[in-house]
Image (cartoon, grey):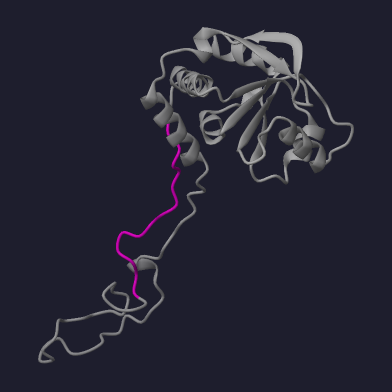
Amino acid sequence: MQVEVLNISGKKTSKTVELVDVIYNAEANEHCVYLDVKLFLANQRQGTHKSKERAEIARTTKKLKKQKGTGGARAGSMKSPLFVGGGRVFGPRPRDYSFKLNKKVKSLARISALTTKAKDQAITVLEDFNFEVPKTKSYTDLIQNLNLNDKKTLLVLGAHNKNVYLSSRNLPKAKVVVATDLNTYDILNADTVILAESSVKVIETILNK
């Protein structure tokens, strides 16, 4: 699939880029996408939640009332979860939410996500560029030139570029990643994926194995 390359002014250049069918026109596997997104979200969780159970509550162990004759149920400790301030039954404990996912499944998930974007015509290829200094307005002008003002965008760079990254950091609907860090969640979360010209080859090297 041939795609025209745009410059930062949003105008077409004389160059075109080949987006290989193996990555951008494959058969999407929704289950692999689901698993990879689930893994990504699980890895974002700190897992530091904790509540005190009965054995961890610091309260008196004195018997509250006599065993019989009150007309109510017997009670032996204020630590009981039946009382306000008592320990919680089966409360949350610190845990790790991550799980194992095979490399081929992750790769197929990213291919499926890129295929979906390509079929929706939500992929734009941009000529490699750089900003002289980090400036949010420079990145805002770039998005405006591409007519993507109100859309979530994901810019994929071929290599790390500090000025471009810092210029986009204050914009809530813009995200910049390096091609080697591209993940399924970011692709699907964006309305439009902007591929820097140099990133196309990097993605092809990683996913077309």
Q: Position of residue 24 (x, y in %)?
A: 52, 14
Q: Residue at x 76, y 21 (%)?
A: 11
User: Is residue 83 among what the camera can see?
Assistant: yes
User: Is residue 209 among what the camera can see?
Assistant: no
Quadrant location, the N terminus: top right
- Taking depth in this image into account, of 39 and 57 the one nearest to the observer is 39
Verify whether residue 94 appears in magenta: yes
Q: Position of residue 133 (x, y in %)?
A: 88, 36
Verify whether residue 165 appears in magenta: no
> Is the residue 122 above or below the residue 163 in the image?
above
Magenta span: helix, strand or loop, mainly? loop
Q: Residue at x 36, y 65 (%)?
A: 53
Quadrant for residue 127, please give it.
Answer: top right
What residue occupies the far right of the structure in this picture? 132
Q: Residue at x 46, y 23 (%)?
A: 109
What residue occupies the far bottom of the structure in this picture? 69
Q: Is residue 62 left or right of residue 140?
A: left
- Taking depth in this image into account, of 8 and 111 the one nearest to the observer is 8
Magenta-highlighted residues: 86-100
Q: Position of residue 192 (x, y in %)?
A: 59, 30
Q: Is residue 61 left or right of residue 201?
A: left
